[in-house]
Image (cartoon, rainbow, N blue to C red):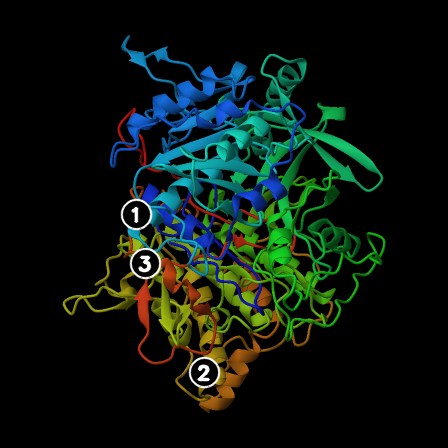
């Protein structure tokens, strides 16, 4: 599970990394529906407002020219509301609304028994409003039996969910959310529906009608949060609900929440045919770079809508055609990033691009990702994406929830960051401006962020790092990313979100396979005058944050934190795909990457990660006295290690030397932070050769760009031999205060014949397909505990994974990144035809 988003005045965004197939930052396997909905609920903590129906209608339901007959107000008066019999409500509601032509160009359809066949979760709302030409219909199944209409998330306009029990909202609670178990389940359910609609459609906002027996609420969602009406009796006061539906059906598409900058590509159109033809052109699986064409071909899924998306560049507009996104950030509130392999409509036979569609946080302190990338490109920083074009969507597509909150609190002290974005930004390609002084002190901070719809297109199309062929390629690709990080830092920019989803494999025509450090939207200028957070949530992705950052959310992210994150990324891939002595990978991944502690009333780093960093060794905790804890050891594919096997019996893998050396630096780093002279650093093991198994024999095949510029000390010792613990810790920790030592270490191990790398070693993913199910998450009411503070205090409580605040939850500095997410896996679904609720 992921860490709830808890608003704070001085922290930046922590990304929520759901364990789902669309992302790279997965740790514990495929989640079930309950876990998914619980994450959604936590990610929306403090993201709701409840207002009167009159205020809701005034703000969000503009009037239409055609007036309705007042006699229609009571058409739902006879809907049965017997407790526990919500299914009896569906037909009367559908029949009454359709018969009276409340929405004449649309059709209400009961889809409660069948989910969308193209979605693995098989979730199905009770009733959906569809355009008449897109309305699902009853059909005949493969066995000849009749089938009820199936949900179609690509075209459902609005969902109506019927309940006869608990209300998910409580107007008396500070966060407006019910604390009852049933209320929480219902809230997670409707959030899941909204997430699916945001996934499949191009929407700026979404409405939902929630029937609660004889009561009703209307809810509006955007990427800032959600606003719900107070519950009203639709049987005695049905005019509110009928008027809302009447107006909704007579609005234009933009007012209903559809993005006018996105045009649906019809399957039988010339443009669709051209996309299919381009996907087949120049097909050559033998070419390494053919993976880009294959990714585009895979995106042309006929079960998903294809789109022509407009990118409003400076002084111009370009159109790109896309199919199914190959990355989707989870969640409702937040940036909602989706990534597409794209083609320029004006040059369909031209190169492929990568287009990222997101709702960036709008703040004068936060640069657009495209501005940062153009700056890095101008400075010649290697291994980062090359900007093609970018810009905010021109139709002033901005979230509105935050404006209502500000209006409701206008008599209180104003929010700090309410000024418009700076008008004095330099021309793109020029030096980035320094940020202004932080003004958060003694200000009332709005818990709802202002998001703007934003698109960015880059020239490189990378692929997931999980596609690496062997450990040497993995280490080289990560070294490329570390070098990119070092060069960006040299030019005054720090990334601040190193994670498994933000490091990619990319094939360069001249240099071959290399790494690509992606997603710079959370980056920050190193000489910033705003050391405090620029946003409400913590910066980064939970699984890969340093121990120090997890335990101290108010600290500024520094080089040591980023280098530790790179180490966590290396471990993340290595333990999943290489040979080693860890028997239960799912359990280890949960304990190391996803787990957390609660101390001093705050969420903090999990016990295992903290233990490993401070002891300088990755410990495999067996949990029994019969089998003692041992250190993680990587091995050649010849030997199948077990937890009790003597390490000396294994030919040493070069990763063991890399791990022990870096862990020694990290151990000294934390020893100096807490109590200098505490312990000694781990000693590196010697490299050994494995007989009878294929190894890399050529060591001049990798390209290393000149890296001597700005080096502090290229002759430093990676494993100092000083016998004095204090001096040794200082010397070891010094290796962790710049990029130089780790770049030297990896280059040496990659190129020296002393280190023999296996070639045929990669294994199938060791994460259990059925998923590792941790303990239940804490109650949402406990979400008022802040992520922050010092090292764990008192007796910490341990819980299940806390991964974010996603992305919100993912609230990065610019277009959302991704992926940030995870292992490619599918969720288990229920029996065919069974509603998931």
**Residue 241: % across, % down:** 49, 33
Q: How far, Cα to Cα, is label 2 from label 1?
A: 47 Å
Q: Nearer the viewer, residue 152 or 478?
A: 152
Give the quadrant of residue 237. top left
Q: Residues within 10 Å of mark 3 (few under 14, many from 20)?
A: many
Per the model, the C-alpha gap separating discs 3 and 2 is 24 Å
Q: Give above or below for 584 relative to 291.
A: below
Asked whether, in this view, residue 237 is left or right of residue 828, the answer is right
Question: Looking at the image, which is closer to me, 730 or 185?
Answer: 185
Element type where label 2 sits in the image = helix
Q: Mark 2 near mark 1, Cβ–Cβ under 8 Å?
A: no
- Location of residue 537 (image quadrant): bottom right
Which is nearer the N-term, disc 3 or disc 2?
3
Task: Give the percent coordinates (x, y) of residue 351.
Answer: 70, 31
Q: Which residue is mark 3?
A: 588
Element on which disc 1 rests = helix
Q: Which residue is mark 2?
A: 671
Q: Residues within 10 Å of mark 1 (few under 14, many from 20)?
A: some
Quarter-of-image position of residue 57: top right
Q: Residue at x 60, y 37 (%)?
A: 61
Whether residues under marks 3 and 1 lie with C-beta atoms below 8 angstroms apart, the answer is: no
Identify the image quadrant of the N terminus: bottom left
Q: Residue at x 76, y 38 (%)?
A: 312
Vertically, is 635 above or below 132? below
Depth check, mark 2 against mark 1: the one in front is 1
């Amino acid at each position: 599970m992921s860490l709830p988003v808890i608003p704070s005045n001085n922290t930046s965004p922590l990304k929520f990394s759901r364990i789902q197939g669309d992302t790279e930052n997965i740790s514990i396997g495929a989640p079930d529906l309950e876990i998914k909905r619980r994450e959604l609920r936590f990610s929306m903590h403090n993201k709701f407002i409840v207002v009167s129906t009159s205020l809701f209608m005034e703000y969000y339901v503009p009037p239409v020219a055609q007036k309705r007959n007042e006699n229609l107000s009571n058409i739902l008066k006879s809907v049965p509301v017997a407790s526990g019999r919500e299914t009896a409500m569906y037909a009367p509601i559908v029949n009454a609304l359709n018969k009276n032509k409340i929405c004449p160009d649309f059709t209400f359809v009961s889809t409660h028994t069948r989910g969308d066949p193209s979605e693995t979760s098989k979730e199905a709302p009770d009733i959906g409003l569809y355009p008449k030409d897109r309305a699902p219909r009853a059909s005949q199944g493969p066995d000849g039996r009749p089938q009820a209409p199936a949900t179609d998330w690509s075209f459902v306009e609005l969902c109506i969910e019927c309940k006869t029990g608990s209300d998910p909202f409580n107007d008396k609670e500070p966060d407006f959310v019910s604390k009852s178990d049933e209320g929480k389940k219902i809230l997670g359910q409707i959030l899941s529906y909204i997430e699916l609609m945001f996934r499949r459609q191009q929407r700026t906002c979404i409405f939902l009608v929630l029937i609660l027996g004889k009561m009703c609420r209307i809810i509006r969602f955007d990427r800032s949060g959600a606003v719900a009406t107070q519950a009203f009796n639709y049987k005695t006061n049905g005019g509110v609900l009928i008027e809302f539906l009447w107006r909704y059906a007579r609005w234009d598409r933009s007012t209903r929440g559809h993005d006018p900058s996105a045009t649906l590509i019809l399957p039988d159109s010339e443009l669709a045919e051209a996309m299919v033809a381009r996907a087949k052109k120049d097909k050559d699986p033998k070419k390494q770079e053919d993976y880009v064409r294959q990714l585009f071909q895979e995106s042309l899924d006929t079960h998903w809508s294809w789109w022509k998306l407009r990118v409003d560049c400076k002084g111009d507009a370009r159109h790109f055609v896309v199919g199914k996104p190959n990355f989707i950030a989870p969640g409702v509130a937040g940036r909602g990033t989706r990534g597409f392999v794209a083609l320029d409509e004006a040059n369909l036979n031209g190169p492929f691009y990568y287009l990222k569609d997101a709702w960036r946080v709008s703040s004068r302190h936060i640069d657009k990702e495209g501005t940062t990338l153009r700056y890095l490109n101008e400075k010649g920083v290697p291994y980062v994406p090359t900007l093609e074009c970018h810009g905010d969507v021109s139709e002033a597509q901005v979230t509105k929830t935050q404006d209502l909150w500000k209006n409701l609190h206008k008599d209180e002290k104003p929010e700090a960051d309410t000024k418009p974005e700076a008008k004095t930004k330099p021309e793109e390609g020029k030096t980035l401006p320094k940020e202004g002084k932080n003004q958060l002190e003694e200000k009332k901070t709005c818990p709802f962020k202002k998001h703007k719809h934003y698109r960015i297109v880059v020239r490189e199309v990378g692929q997931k790092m999980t596609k690496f062929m062997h450990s040497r390629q993995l280490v080289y690709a990560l070294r490329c990313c570390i070098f990119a990080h070092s060069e960006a830092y040299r030019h005054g920019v720090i990334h601040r979100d190193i994670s498994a989803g933000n490091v990619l494999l990319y094939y360069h025509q001249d240099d071959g396979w290399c790494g690509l450090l992606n997603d710079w939207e959370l980056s920050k200028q190193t000489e910033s005058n705003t050391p405090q957070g620029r946003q409400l949530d913590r910066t980064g992705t939970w699984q890969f944050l340093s121990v120090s950052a997890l335990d101290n959310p108010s600290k500024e992210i520094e080089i040591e934190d980023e280098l530790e994150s790179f180490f966590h990324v290396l471990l993340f891939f290595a333990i999943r795909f290489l040979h080693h002595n860890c028997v239960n990978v799912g359990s280890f991944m949960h304990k190391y990457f996803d787990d957390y502690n609660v101390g001093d009333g705050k969420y903090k780093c999990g016990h295992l990660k903290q233990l490993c960093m401070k002891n300088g060794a990755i410990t495999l905790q067996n949990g029994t006295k019969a089998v003692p804890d041992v250190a993680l050891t990587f091995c050649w594919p010849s030997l199948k290690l077990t937890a009790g096997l003597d390490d000396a019996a294994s030919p040493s893998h070069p990763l063991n030397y890399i791990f022990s050396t870096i862990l020694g630096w990290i151990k000294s780093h934390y020893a100096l932070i807490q109590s200098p002279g505490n312990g000694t650093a781990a000693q590196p093991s010697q490299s050994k050769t494995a007989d009878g198994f294929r190894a890399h024999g050529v060591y001049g095949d990798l390209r290393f760009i000149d890296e001597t510029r700005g080096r502090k000390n290229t002759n430093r010792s990676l494993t100092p031999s000083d016998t004095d613990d204090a001096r040794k810790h200082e010397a070891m920790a010094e290796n962790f205060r710049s990029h130089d030592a780790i770049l030297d270490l990896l280059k040496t191990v990659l190129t020296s014949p002393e280190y023999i790398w296996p070639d045929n070693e990669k294994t199938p993913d060791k994460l259990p397909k059925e998923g590792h199910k941790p303990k239940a998450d804490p109650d949402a009411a406990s979400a008022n505990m802040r992520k922050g503070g010092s090292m764990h205090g008192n007796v910490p409580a341990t819980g299940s994974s806390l991964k974010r605040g996603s992305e919100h939850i993912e609230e990065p500095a610019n277009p959302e990144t991704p992926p940030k997410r995870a292992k490619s896996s599918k969720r288990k679904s229920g029996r065919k035809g069974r509603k998931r609720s």
